[in-house]
Image (cartoon, grey):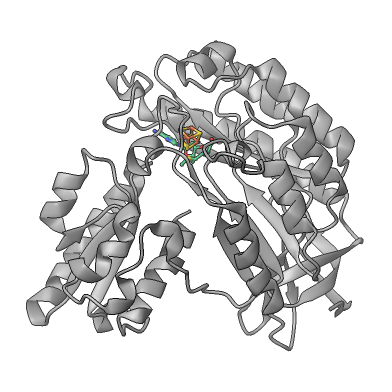
Amino acid sequence: MNYSDGERIASVLNDLGYTQTNDDTKADLIIVIACSVKQSAIDRVYGRIKNWNKIKETRPLIIAITGCLLPNDKPMMEEKFDLAFDISELSQLPSLLKAKKDDFKNIKNYFDIHPIPKSSFQVYIPIMTGCNNFCTYCAVPYTRGREKSRASKDILAEIKTYIDKGYKEITLLGQNVNSYGNDLDGEIKFPELLKQVNDIPGNFWLRFMTSHPKDMSDELIDIMKTGDKICDYLHLPVQAGDDKVLQKMNRKYTIKHYKSLIKKVRKAIPNISISTDTIVGFPTETKWQFYKTKRLYKQMQYDMAYISKYSPRIGTVSAKLEDNINLDEKKRREKSLTKIVKKSGLKHNKVLLNTIQTILVEEYDGKYIIGKTRSAKAIKALSRNDLTGHFIDIIITDIQPFSLSGKIKEASD
Ligand code: SAM
Ligand code: SF4
């Protein structure tokens, strides 16, 4: 989501006459897209401010912050930054920067701002913002507000323009894509939207995230199975392996339900690659409850997992609970899940040895092309040429738990 925010901010600033630089020391304006979801992200932002303040001593520089800002973090941000604004107020940025332009008069909301994609072949399309789920640990419903879906006709029209320009990978974004359309009268639901995007003629891959297990339907699994452009990759956050912990997190599903979803998905799409999110050390999580998460990891055989150590976010429900698991124990739990997922990742990747895999090349470092397969496996291969933005076939010669290496077979597009 932050990536997509960045593209929209770039669009607003572009219209104001700003150009982009990667060099802090040359910037007239720095906008931080923060994530209050995790304390570590906020700490990193505070660390960089010191350097920017030094620049400000020598010349004018505006430092602004936006993104996922918790109401409680905002006063502190307002103190440290020249400007702190909610991402939903992006349309007011020009006036906030005291540079009103006529073009911005009619902009009503976030979705009306057309982003400038950083890439010429991959694009992230937010289909909704906000979240109604109020998982007890999570800041998103407070920072991004309630779910707001975007009209499907606008989404489809935007995607068509990218496909006409030759874009090769479209990723539909939302905190819970499975509840897309629930807030709009007469709007199609997510499986139908996914199908309609899939049916747009063109040579492209289609991804989406994130799916909430409580809302994932058989109809969606069916579309995933039949849609020829839909990538065989699913990110399905589980968060914890114990029903009582899930209840305390307000996740609204049981492990039995979660397992049945994974079983259905694997049956429908046998080569699918599956990843998850997990929080370790949620308040009161016992060793036995954590053991159940470990057991679940072994059963699910994930390809990849994003494991977070619990950190209380002020204003959320769980922040009122005592953060009773110490940091060392959280690190230990994180390490032990990482060990399991490394094993299952390696096992899945072993099957790919000596096979030919197509990647969409995302970058070239002068020596290697690096890209991802349809199943989101990162692969690198030696190349004399920069093949960024092309579909390329790779013969897999070496594997690691979360990445692979190989040699180029031939260009396939
Ligand atoms: N909407 C997605 C879902 O339903 O799982 C997740 C979005 S959340 C912004 C991204 C991930 O950050 C979560 O899946 C969770 O694992 C992690 N996270 C959120 N709040 C956290 C907290 N207070 N402490 C640690 N990790 C947290
Ligand atoms: Fe946060 Fe839960 Fe919404 Fe995901 S579903 S954004 S974890 S509140």
Point out residue 344 in the picture as x, y percentages from the top left corner. Answer: 75, 39
- Quarter location, residue 353: bottom right
Question: Is 326 on the left or on the right of 406, as rendered?
Answer: left
Q: Residue at x 26, y 63 (%)?
A: 92
Point out residue 281 in the picture as x, y percentages from the top left corner. Answer: 44, 24
Front residue (pair 265, 357): 265
Question: Is 222 on the left or on the right of 369, as rendered?
Answer: right
Up-down: is 305 above or below 329?
A: below
- Residue at far bottom of view: 384
Point out residue 228 in the picture as x, y percentages from the top left corner. Answer: 85, 56
Q: How many marks?
A: 0
Q: Residue at x 83, y 35 (%)?
A: 266
Q: Is residue 361 visible?
A: yes
Q: Residue at x 85, y 72 (%)?
A: 393
Front residue (pair 400, 231): 231
Point out residue 247 in the picture as x, y percentages from the top left corner. Answer: 51, 15
